[in-house]
Amino acid sequence: MVDFSLWDIVRNLLLAARWTVGLSLIAFVGGSVVGLLLLVLRLSKLPGMDTLVGAYVQLFQGVPLLVQLFLAYYGLGLFGINTSPWVAAGLGLTLYASAFLAEIWRGCVASIPLGQWEASQSLALSFYEQLRYIILPQALKIAVPPTVGFLVQVIKGTALASVIGFMELTKVGKTIANATFSPFLIFSCVAIMYFVLCYPVSLYAKRLERKIHAHR
Amino acid sequence: MKIQLDFMAVLSEWPLLLTGVAWTLALTAASVVVGTLVGIACAWVRARGFGATRAPVWLQGVVGAYVELIRNTPFIVQLFFIFFGLPAAGFKLSAETASFIAMVVNLGAYATEIIRAGLEATPRGQMEAAHSLALSDRQTFVWVVLPPALKKVWPSLVSQITIVMLGSSVCGQISTQELSYAADLIQSRNFRSFEAFMVVGAIYLLLAITTRQLLNWAGAKFLFGRR
């Protein structure tokens, strides 16, 4: 048995928290890019796109993230790609985040009055110009609070990457708990660290929300 | 390179899959019933401005901390804390009990916030009318405030219930025999890991869609329909 002082535990968990943060950022940024692409596809009125993106969203919202990560992990291996947990977790969480963000943002775009589309069309703006100059800037304002709120989901979601061997906060916590036989202390510390990461983001999302609704 | 998928190898283990589905549904059903009750109780403590007597401040603090703590930590950590952490502090739990408790605690926190939104939307007149009919505080809450509040937030509650059901897949990590554990077991027998998780993923998708449709329909028809 290895002797761990409290400082050793906290230090190792803090080091592991870097990977939680890193993976969250990858998933969030990647998810935003793919999500935006999906959103544009859906709004483009290309035949079949609405159904296709709808099915994509339904698929990722109806299958547990845990199963998605396993699929990414084993699936990539099946295609002969040498899967490191980084690639599998990054890919799995990116796709997961993209589906949710596409759906959140669709709601925001849907809340823009139809007249805005019609007016911009009557000014002979192309589809891209309508989105770029008229619709998305307005939708962005409404989209910020729920998007920040979803970031909390992503951070919590990265905890599941531990099951495919990604050494982030939860996995390191479990490893140390197995080595020291003090799971109560260690999982308390892990929970506190997640809380410290997530709670400020939650509060910020709530504040943004209040600011938007203040004028009503 | 040619990839050969063998779904029959997975499907031939259908008794395992069936047990998994049964456990997933049973855990979900049990934790939804208890978790919603927890949510209603906590929502009563936390809700403001629907006219009832306020709960004592310390209780509001405790419930507030519970809700924020659960909503800002991952489910898997809550589960590990209950299953690995609590026995070290003297509470020994089976994997199934630990999963059930974790799901109740988790759903309870989210349901609190959902139901609270419904309670706070109660018009003042409802409370005044109830009091003028000499209903007690408790009667007013149970018969006047709560039913329309639940009706208002039912769709959100159904979403959360679906999320909890999908989240129960994590319970396989502590060897509860639910659906994703079945997939793990099957792939350890025949090494068809991708196929096993494809099949289980499809079953989850089916369960999620059916549960949502069923609960939305049942909610409109039986729970809050007539009146």
Image (cartoon, rainbow, N blue to C red):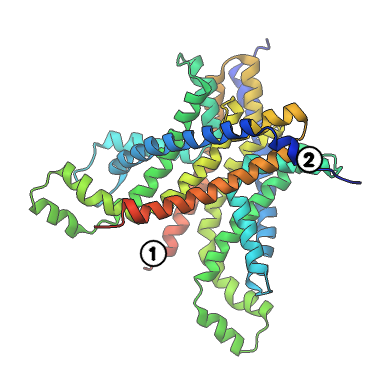
Residue that numbered label 2 is attached to: B6
The image quadrant of residue B18 is top right
Q: Is residue B98 left or right of residue A214?
A: right
Residue that numbered label 1 is attached to: A214
Q: Helix or strand or loop: what does disc 1 sit on?
A: loop
Q: Are marks 1 and 2 on the same chain?
A: no
Residue A23's label in the rendered image is: none
Q: Is residue B142 left or right of residue B179?
A: left
Q: Amino acid at mark 2?
A: Asp
Q: Position of residue A8 (x, y in %)?
A: 64, 21
Mark 1 vs mark 2, CA separation in Å: 57 Å
Q: Amino acid at mark 1?
A: Ala
Observer-nearest residue: B166 or B187?
B187
Q: Residues within 10 Å of mark 2 (few under 14, many from 20)?
A: few
Observer-nearest residue: A145 or A117?
A117
Q: Is residue B200 visible?
A: yes
Whether A115 is drawn above or below B149: the answer is below
Whether B142 is drawn above or below B227: the answer is above
Q: Residue shown at 60%/57% (left/top)?
A: A101
Q: Is residue B22 left or right of residue A131?
A: left
Whether B115 is drawn above or below A85: the answer is below
Q: Is residue A168 visible?
A: no
Q: Position of residue A96 (x, y in %)?
A: 64, 50
